[in-house]
Amino acid sequence: MDIIEVFSKNVKKYRNEMGLSQEAFAEKSGLHRTYISALECKKRSIALDNVQKIADTLEIEPYLLFKE
Amino acid sequence: MDIIEVFSKNVKKYRNEMGLSQEAFAEKSGLHRTYISALECKKRSIALDNVQKIADTLEIEPYLLFKE
């Protein structure tokens, strides 16, 4: 799997573990709902500062989002 | 440390372990030398597709670039 696939899959997994919808997650992270949706569909590359926002929202260490 | 600090430090560490100058690393990765220099100086955010190129060049799993 490439990095974007692994990352997308992990965001979705941790988001579901927190019981957050894409919309609730978007609101909590300060990112737009369509951006969350696009990244979970592997439709766009993400910049590292947004990876930080996502990890903070999920309350996990960023590297976990890149582990297969 | 934030994600960009951790990432920058790790790129530099693994690049030095391979004995590559910034210039040689840039050539091997297909990224521009000024881009490598800027990322090691934490001057810019990096998109995930370039993180993939960097990890491939360093012959490591991408998540290692995010571990403190």
Image: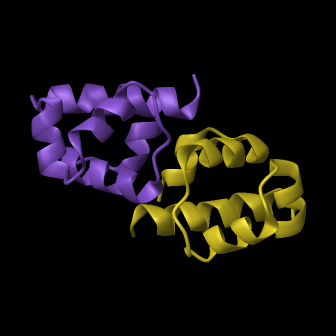
Chain colours: A purple, B yellow
B9 relative to B16 in the view: left or right:
left
Does any portion of residue A68 appear in the rendered image?
no
A53 relative to B65 in the view: left or right:
left
B60 relative to A45 in the view: left or right:
right
Q: Quadrant of residue B11?
A: bottom right
Q: Quadrant of residue A11?
A: top left
Does any portion of residue B10 appear in the rendered image?
yes
Q: Residue A8 at x, y = what percent?
A: 40, 30
Q: Residue furthest front?
A: A34
Could you say which is closer to the camera, residue B41 or residue B18?
Answer: B41
A25 relative to A53 in the view: left or right:
left
Q: Residue B62 at x, y = what percent?
A: 58, 42
* Residue lying at 64% horizontally and 48% vertically, measured from the top left: B50
* Residue lying at 47% horizontally and 53% vertically, measured from the top left: A47
* Residue lying at 80% horizontally and 67% vertically, measured from the top left: B33
* Residue lying at 39% horizontally and 39% vertically, measured from the top left: A65
Q: Is residue A41 above or below residue A24?
A: above
Position of the N terminus of chain B, as image quadrant, is: bottom left
Q: Residue B8 at x, y = what percent?
A: 58, 66
